[in-house]
Image (cartoon, rainbow, N blue to C red):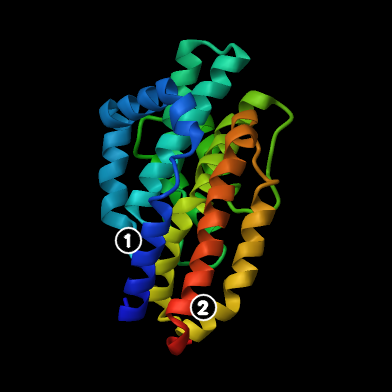
């Protein structure tokens, strides 16, 4: 990463540190703990995590750390949505397994065009080697196909059939909040070797995208907590933009 971006990223972290963690983690701490425990102890998830760590490139802002965060948060959303819908413990646990598996694999083809579609096709082949029923593999792959923003959502009329897909989407879009400015964009500009002038020129357009994403959350839990993630990201982004245009103006 260029020295200028290292300095700007440090400023972004300093700004982000002044904001409290989203209330999603406080209000739903009980579900977060269940999701984390499952992620740390389930044998299939452990196997998939090793596979992903060996096959997912980590230099594009959507590496293993991103995949783990998405898996954990999507798992939390599944737990809450299942509880509110009155689903059984066994059903909930299987949905949790599916959504965390989808979370680990959802960006496995991130560097390719139409990465969600190609990632789903790749995941279908990978998951044949794991202990999933064919219909479960289909559900995981559907979730991966559906995780991109502003794209057609291949849904179902049955709420339970879309649960994994919708929860993966929301867990992934939570990352458009603070994570976007502390990690994601810096990995991406480093990978693309983006000149600072081009980065600044596209900054306003990127901020507009954050505003639009607030309206796309799919689950009740996502709709309740997702906008706060995005609003925090927007606040960080606006302050950082001012810092860049003052402190770093000679470089623009």
Q: Can you tell which mark lies on residue 242?
A: none
Q: How many marks?
A: 2
Label 1 CA crowd tier, 10 Å (few <14, some 14–19, many 20+): some
Which of the two residues, 106 or 130, is positioned nearer the viewer here?
106
Secondary element type, mark 2: helix
Can you give x and y, in whole percent of width and height, for residue 227 in the image? 61, 43
Q: Residue at label 2?
A: 245
Q: CA distance from mark 1 to mark 2?
A: 30 Å
Can you give x and y, in whole percent of width and height, for residue 203 in the image? 57, 72
Label 2 CA crowd tier, 10 Å (few <14, some 14–19, many 20+): few
User: Badges 1 and 2: C-beta atoms under 8 Å apart?
Assistant: no
Residue 202 in sight from this viewpoint: yes
Q: Residue at label 1?
A: 58
Q: Nearer the viewer, mark 1 or mark 2?
A: 2
Residue 169 is left or right of residue 60, and the answer is right
Secondary element type, mark 1: loop
Can you give x and y, in whole percent of width and height, for residue 64 in the image? 33, 51
């Amino acid at each position: 990463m260029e020295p200028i971006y290292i300095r700007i990223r440090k400023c972004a972290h300093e700004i982000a540190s002044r904001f409290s963690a989203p209330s999603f983690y406080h209000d739903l701490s009980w579900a977060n703990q269940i999701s984390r425990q499952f992620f740390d102890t389930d044998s299939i998830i452990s196997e998939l995590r090793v596979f992903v760590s060996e096959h997912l490139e980590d230099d594009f802002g959507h590496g293993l750390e991103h995949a783990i965060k998405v898996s954990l948060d999507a798992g939390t959303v599944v737990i809450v949505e299942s509880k509110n819908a009155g689903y059984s413990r066994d059903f909930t646990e299987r949905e949790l397994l599916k959504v965390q598996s989808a979370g680990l694999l959802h960006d496995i083809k991130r560097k390719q065009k139409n990465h969600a579609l190609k990632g789903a096709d790749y995941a279908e082949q990978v998951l044949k080697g794991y202990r999933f029923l064919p219909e479960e593999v289909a559900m995981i792959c559907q979730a991966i196909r559906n995780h991109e923003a502003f794209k057609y959502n291949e849904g179902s009329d049955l709420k339970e059939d879309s649960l994994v897909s919708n929860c993966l989407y929301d867990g992934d879009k939570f990352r458009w909040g603070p994570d976007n400015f502390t990690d994601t964009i810096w990995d991406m500009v480093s990978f693309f070797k983006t000149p600072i002038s081009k980065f600044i020129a596209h900054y306003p357009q990127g901020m507009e995208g954050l505003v639009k994403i607030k309206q796309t959350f799919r689950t009740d839990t996502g709709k309740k907590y997702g906008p706060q993630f995005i609003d925090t990201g927007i606040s960080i982004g606006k302050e950082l933009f001012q810092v860049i245009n003052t402190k770093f103006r000679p470089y623009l």
